[in-house]
Image (cartoon, rainbow, N blue to C red):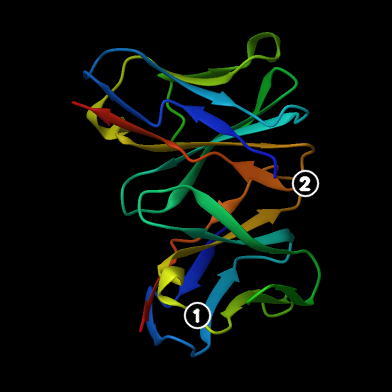
Amino acid sequence: QQKVQQSPESLTVSEGAMASLNCTFSDGTSNNFRWYRQHSAKGLEVLVSIFSDGEKEEGRFTAHLNRANLHVSLHIREPQPSDSAVYLCAVSFTGNYKYVFGAGTRLKVIA
Amino acid sequence: GPKVLQIPSHQIIDMGQMVTLNCDPVSNHLYFYWYKQILGQQMEFLVNFYNGKVMEKSKLFKDQFSVERPDGSYFTLKIQPTALEDSAVYFCASSLAGGAEVFFGKGTRLTVV
């Protein structure tokens, strides 16, 4: 069964410090990777999509993908209190037209 | 950008009754999805749908669940009968192709009492 795991479960950072979130996936048949943000009891906001090894930047959000290590990370530059939310990693696997989500990392940015 | 609309945003229903959740997907999209998120828990895949058929469903997609998109109208999730454990936020999503970017709606919060 394809699995996606995120760490840490929760993270507190000071405003302006880099925030780094991790996501590991179960096997190498994965093809698309997305990071979403979910503010409390609200919908999903896509932050960055990445399809090949390396780095992809969207504004203050940078994703790093390393398929060999089954790992994708999200780095948030200069986080602000308004970035406090749950961050979800989503992975699609070859042959499946769906995304498997991790349990999320709850980020709190303090002023 | 493209938007998936879900109506209503919140629905309260008596246990045992039928409920239909409506989703208006992005207009030219061909693949449709439902996900379920119990409050504070993980987003879980329920079902995907293409060309009038269910392609894949998870074990969460119980026999009481059904989906359809009659004549290009709303993509619907019907639960009949509802149970207390069906209380959750249900997210609809759509994509142009199977591996293309998926756009999510804001969800419908279903409360079964």
Label 2 sits on a secondary structure element that is: loop
Residue under the point 43% across and 61% down: A103
Question: Which residue is tagged 1?
Answer: A79
Measured as percent of width and height from the top left, residue B22 is found at: 50, 22
Rendered image quadrant of residue B108: top left
Residue under the point 40% across and 70% down: A84
Measured as percent of width and height from the top left, residue B95 is found at: 72, 38
Say which chain tag 2 marks. B
Q: Horizontal placement of B100 versus A19: left or right?
A: right
Q: Is residue B14 above or below residue A3?
A: above
Mark 1, mark 2: which one is toward the viewer? 1
Instruction: Identify the amino acid type marked 1.
Output: Pro
Measured as percent of width and height from the top left, residue A30 is found at: 71, 60
Residue under the point 43% across and 69% down: A82
Instruction: Identify the amino acid type marked 2.
Output: Gly
Q: Residues within 10 Å of mark 2 (few under 14, many from 20)?
A: some
Whether residue A1 is visible, yes or no, is: no
Of residue A19 and residue A10, the one placed in the foreground of this image is A19
Numbered mark located on residue B99 in the image: 2
Label 1 sits on a secondary structure element that is: loop
Quadrant occupied by the N terminus of chain A: bottom right
Whether residue B45 is visible, yes or no, is: yes
